[in-house]
Amino acid sequence: MLLKVKAYLELSRWVNCLMAGLAVLLGGFISLVNYTEIFSVYLKNISLAIFVAIAISAAGNAINDYYDTDIDRINKSQKPIPSGRLTRKEALIFALVLFAHGVFLSLFINPRLGWAGKVCFFIALFNSVLLIAYSARLKRAGFSGNITIGYLVGSTFLFGGAAIGNLIAAGILALCAMLATISREIAKGIEDYVGDKACGAKTLPVLIGPAKASVIMLIFLVAAIALSPFPYLLRLFGYSYLVVVGIADLVFLVAIGLLLSNPTPARAAEVKRILKFGMGVALLAFLVGAVVK
């Protein structure tokens, strides 16, 4: 029994699920307008939103392994399905049950908002369908897969804001996270360029070349940098936010310069790590802005 539970936890990639829950937590926290509501509104609704996000993330990871069984038998034979610890049918049922529970429970997040409160339901439903489509087809469709991943990452922050009923701050964070994630996904594609080209994968760097892909990456990253001051300009956050997010923007600019000067797989691997650090600093900026507010 314990071995089965462990296999399901591994299938769900529980660490990634907790990260999704943390993103919802942050998205909700920065969206609070009145801190006197932190116990009456925030904790109740955000707790349910976190549970929904974790359930749908776990379902998405499980359905991904369901579709990738043949590939995993070659590359990752120790995973639950190819190792025989779980069957494909068990993984599919697990995923569908979690999708259904997550979407259903999203109906009860912040019911006092009426139909405005159903934003969480629509996000949960759309993300569930998108996760299935990504695993079944979009994952292998190159650039559209990059955009899908970017949206899914950004939507977790938006989900937290929707749970509180305030989408402005969380919406800006979600869009910045989406743009930065797409840039990082392109960098990953440049890093894997040689292997992907040999295998016939239709990634953006394979289709247009690493140099042109670097320019596309730059466009998305510059857009994220351009959006970053808006919480300050809209008076959502104060000067402390602007200082910290400025550091994140500098990190992003360094990443842009490094990759444009040498768009090779080795350099892309370095840039990918820098982008991850910059995204962490940007998240810290939003947190600092919310706390100081």
Image (tube, rainbow, N blue to C red):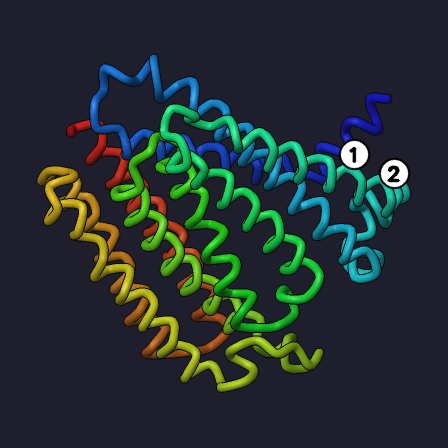
Name the secondary structure under disc 1.
Answer: helix
Residue at the spot 36% in from the left edge and 49% down from the top edge: 174
Q: Dot 2: within a 10 Å radius of its alpha carbon, few (fewer than 14), some, or many (20 or more) residues?
A: some
Residue at the spot 65% in from the left edge and 69% down from the top edge: 140
- Upstream in sequence: badge 1 or badge 2: 1
Q: Left or right: 238 with respect to 131?
A: left
Instruction: Return the x and y of residue 274 as percentages of the image width and height.
Output: 37, 57
Instruction: Return the x and y of residue 97 as percentages of the image width and height.
Output: 73, 36
Quarter of image, res 138? bottom right
Instruction: Return the x and y of residue 250 as percentages of the image width and height.
Output: 22, 57
**Disc assigned to residue 80:** none
Q: Nearer the viewer, residue 106 or 161?
A: 106
Residue furthest out toward the bottom: 208
Q: Nearer the viewer, residue 278 or 22?
A: 22
Q: Are marks 1 and 2 in contact (CB under 8 Å)?
A: yes
Locate the C terminus by quadrant: top left
Locate the N terminus by quadrant: top right
Residue at the spot 82% in from the left edge and 22% down from the top edge: 2
| Above or below: residue 279 compared with residue 93 | below
Name the secondary structure under disc 2.
Answer: loop
* Residue type marked 2: Arg
Q: Dot 1: within a 10 Å radius of its alpha carbon, few (fewer than 14), some, or many (20 or more) residues?
A: some
Gap between marks 1 and 2, in whole Å? 7 Å
Which residue is denoted by mark 1 in the rendering? 7
Which residue is denoted by mark 2 in the rendering? 85
Quarter of image, res 22? top left
* Residue type marked 1: Ala
Q: Nearer the viewer, residue 122 or 183?
A: 122
Instruction: Return the x and y of residue 89 as percentages of the image width and height.
Output: 87, 44
Residue at the spot 21% in from the left edge and 23% down from the top edge: 34
Q: Nearer the viewer, residue 87 or 258?
A: 87
| Above or below: residue 265 compared with residue 225 | below
